[in-house]
Amino acid sequence: MARVVVDVMLKPEILDPQGQAVQRALPRLGFDGISDVRQGKRFELEVDGPVDDAALARIHDLAETFLANTVIENFTVKVEEK
């Protein structure tokens, strides 16, 4: 079994109110020097069998149609070693 990770992030030009709220709170909590925060989503998929090009293509399609809103979000697909 292999793990494939899909990371989804808002596109840079899209406002990220959750990230901004975290960024504004950091100095009050004693964490200085952070100039920007972007919030995203991470999906970990356990895949039966080998993760070949066909499996990655299927996962890419899954991410594009179900996990990410490609109008406002970008995503990456990668195989993660356990």
Image (spheres, rainbow, N blue to C red):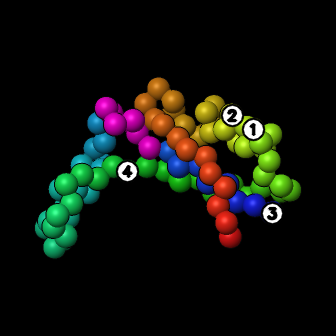
Which disc, if any, is residue 39? 4
Give the Cα separation between the discs numbered 4 and 2.
Answer: 23 Å
Q: Quadrant of the N terminus?
A: bottom right
Q: What residue is shown at x 15% (from left), y 67% (from top)?
A: 32
Q: Earlier in the sequence, mark 4 or mark 2?
A: 4
Q: Which residue is mark 3?
A: 1
Return the residue at label 1: 58
The residues tagged by marks 2 and 1 sit, at their Cα atoms, a distance apart of 5 Å
User: Tag 3's secondary structure?
Assistant: loop
Pointer 2 with pointer 1, Cβ within 8 A: yes
Please report whichever mark, 4 or 3, sits nearer to the chain's N-terminal start.
3
Identify which amino acid the numbered label 3 is placed on: Met
**From what the image shows, is residue 1 above or below residue 55?**
below
Q: Report whether 6 appears left or right of 61.
A: left
Amino acid type shown at disc 2: Asp
Along the line of sight, which residue is nearer the eye, 63 or 2? 2
Does 57 appear above or below 27? above
Of labels 1 and 4, earlier in sequence is: 4
Residue position marked by numbered label 2 in the rendering: 61
Number of numbered labels in the structure image: 4
